[in-house]
Image (spheres, rainbow, N blue to C red):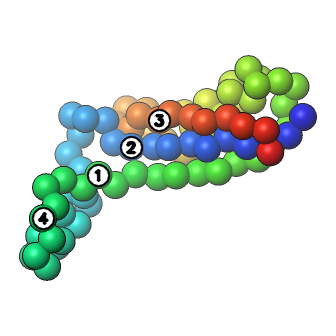
Amino acid sequence: MKFKATIHVMLKKDVADVQGSAIRQSLQNHGEPVTSVSVGKYFEVEFDANDEAAAKAVADKLAVETFSNPTIERHWLEISPA
């Protein structure tokens, strides 16, 4: 069965988001009432798996081993039929 995994990756709360801070400052300089910006990554991956549990395991492995740095980033998944 074909599945689609949506993988979201963000910095952990205790890691400074320098890029987000720079974007926030730029928006404020343009008069926008922005108080916080967080920058992350978003991936959509399609693959074959036997069932949803197996698909979640594949997506989690991809997130941990390929798409994120678990030391400084957290991730979460959405799994759906493709």
Look at the numbered discs 1 and 4 and tell me whether their residues touch, using CB distance below 8 Å: no
Other-residue count near label 2 (Cα within 10 Å), few / some / many at <14 / 14–19 / ≥20: some
Marks 4/2 in contact by CB < 8 Å: the verdict is no
Residue 75: image tag: 3
Location of mark 4 (residue): 33
* Residue beneath the point at 47% across and 52% down: 41
Residue placed under numbered mark 2 in the picture: 10
Contact flag, marks 2 and 1 (Cβ < 8 Å): yes
Q: Position of residue 12 (x, y in %)?
A: 31, 35
Q: What amino acid type should be assigned to the residue bearing mark 4?
A: Pro
Q: Dot 1, crowdedness within 10 Å: few (<14), some or many (≥20)? A: some
| Disc 4 to disc 2, C-alpha distance | 23 Å
Among the two numbered marks 3 and 4 on one chain, the one whose residue lies closer to the N terminus: 4
Q: Are marks 3 and 1 in contact (CB under 8 Å)?
A: no
In the foreground, 73 or 56 = 56
The image quadrant where one finds the C terminus is: top right
- In x, y percent, where is residue 65? 58, 36
Q: Is residue 55 left or right of residue 73?
A: right
The span from disc 1 to disc 4 (Cα, nearest Å) is: 15 Å
Disc number placed over residue 38 in the picture, else none: 1
First in sequence: mark 2 vs mark 1: 2
Identify the secondary structure beneath mark 1.
Answer: loop
Whether tag 3 and tag 2 are in contact, CB under 8 A, the answer is yes
Instruction: Answer few, some or many: residues within 10 Å of disc 3's Cα (few below 14, many 20 plus, some between 14 and 19).
Output: many
Q: What type is the residue that disc 2 sits on?
A: Met
Seen from the viewer's position, the closer of residues 21 and 69 is 21
Tell me which label, 3 or 2, sits earlier in the chain: 2
| SS under mark 4 | loop
Distance from label 3 to label 2 (Cα)?
A: 6 Å
Q: CA distance from mark 3 to mark 4?
A: 28 Å
